Image (cartoon, rainbow, N blue to C red):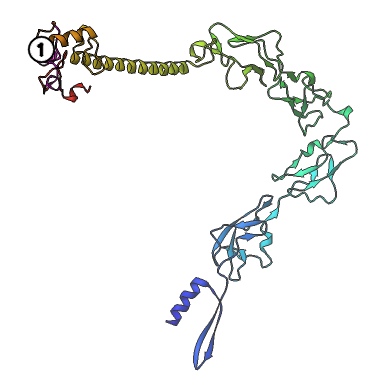
Amino acid sequence: MLKMFYSLWEKMFIISKNRWICFLLLWIVSIRCVTTSCDTQIPHGEMTWWCRMVGQPCPYSCHEGYKDHDTVSWLKCSTSGHWVPWFPDRLYSANFTVEDLCTPKTCTTVISKGTLSAGCQAVVGSICNFSCVVGYVRNASVSELTCQPSTEWSPDVRSLCLRPDGQQCPYAVAGGHLNLGCIREPGHTCSFACNEGYQPSLSPSIIACGSNLEWNYDLGSLCKEIICPSLFEGGYVASNCIRGYQAMCFEYQCNPGYAKSDPASYVTCDESGKWVSHDRKSQPCVNDTLYSFKTTSTVPRNEISIVGIAIGCVMGTILVTVSVGLVILCIRASHKRIIFGHENNRCMGPTGYPQQNASSTAQNQNTTNTGVAAPNVHSFDSRIDMISNKHSGLPPSYSQIQVTSKEYPPAYEQVVANPSVFNL
């Protein structure tokens, strides 16, 4: 059991040394464990993050500006917790250390017609000075060299030392300049670039220095000033507009069948020599049939339609509401006229009975007291009978009126009616 446990322990944690100790008449195994993994960092490089266990071979990579070892591609974590080279088919040198894995990249130490300054290590990132051999002069545009991660000097070492000006092609370019690193000696070619507001007249922008110390193109015509034309697609600018690079013109017109993309805008002369809208996203004049604006209005048609629909809906709602209210008032007024018998437009008194003048009232009283028949005046009781019998089309609630007394006042009949009849 002890042997099995020891074997399993050894596979998992790696035993560096073991010995047996006699303790209380018993042999006890003494086990000393060591580190089970190595660090993921190495000088100027790093190991794969998931690979660091003891005895496991792992790949590595070097940082920028450093190169991998020529023969060692894999490392193995030793029982001492250090990385050692792993060669499946051969032994490695005992003098090899992990510091030898990643070495600095270097640039060439030989430059054309010159030498590097003393103490220049020429490793990636180093900045060095230089001097030229007899018969050549330093390039006035180059003050120092820088070793790039690509192991190339910047600028090009071929442009460091040049012949005197009398033995080179000229360098002045009207409206532009020769690119850095240009060798103005016979047989060499150079590229050039134009300044802002100018555009190259050659494509590609390359010229060659001839044996006569002249370029194959006139330096004065390599870069031409950007001038936008007075006419453009669908329109034109006013004659008083400046047409140079980045010039703005507010006075421009569109031809028939075209409309301004923005009636309140201006046009600008861009770097390609074309007129563009002020936002540089559209042409100044577009086809009117495909345009969503009218030249006489700055409001989009779809917005006008929405406003019109909203106003129409509001006005329609108001008209419908007023009409319904008038109909309701007319119906209620009609019910009142039918109930109280206003067909002859007789007015109602403050008590709800038809008004009579004073003389008629007195006459009716006198005639009643003497027993003589009163004038032919419709009594209130007769009107109640007329409503109950003749107007059978009214609702039942309006046709049922209870008369509780046959004793009449001098001119009128007293009637006690159901109050619900008059509540409209």
Magenta span of residues: 376-401
**Which residue is under mark 1?**
390
Q: Position of residue 367 (x, y in %)?
A: 13, 8
Identity of the residue drawn at 69% across and 60% down: 100
User: Is 410 in front, or is 210?
Assistant: 410
Q: Is residue 115 magenta?
A: no
Residue found at the far front of this picture: 370
User: Is 185 in front, or is 324?
Assistant: 324
Quarter occupied by the N terminus: bottom left
Identity of the residue drawn at 52% across and 72% down: 13
User: Where is 1 relative to 188, above or below?
Assistant: below
Q: Is residue 381 magenta?
A: yes
User: Is 77 in front, or is 423?
Assistant: 423
Identity of the residue drawn at 12% across and 21% down: 401
Q: Position of residue 137 (x, y in %)?
A: 88, 36
Q: Is residue 30 left or right of residue 111?
A: left
**Disc 1 marks which amino acid?**
Lys
Residue found at the far bottom of this picture: 25
User: Where is 252 relative to 79, above or below?
Assistant: above
Q: Is residue 123 left or right of residue 168?
A: left
| Residue 345 in view in this figure | no
Residue found at the far right of this picture: 134
Q: Is residue 228 left or right of residue 257?
A: right
Q: Position of residue 360 (x, y in %)?
A: 20, 7
| Residue 330 in view in this figure | yes
Quarter of image, res 173: top right
- Label 1 SS: helix
Quarter of image, res 169: top right
Label total for image: 1
User: Where is 362 relative to 104, above or below?
Assistant: above
Quarter occupied by the C terminus: top left
User: Where is 136 relative to 20, above or below?
Assistant: above
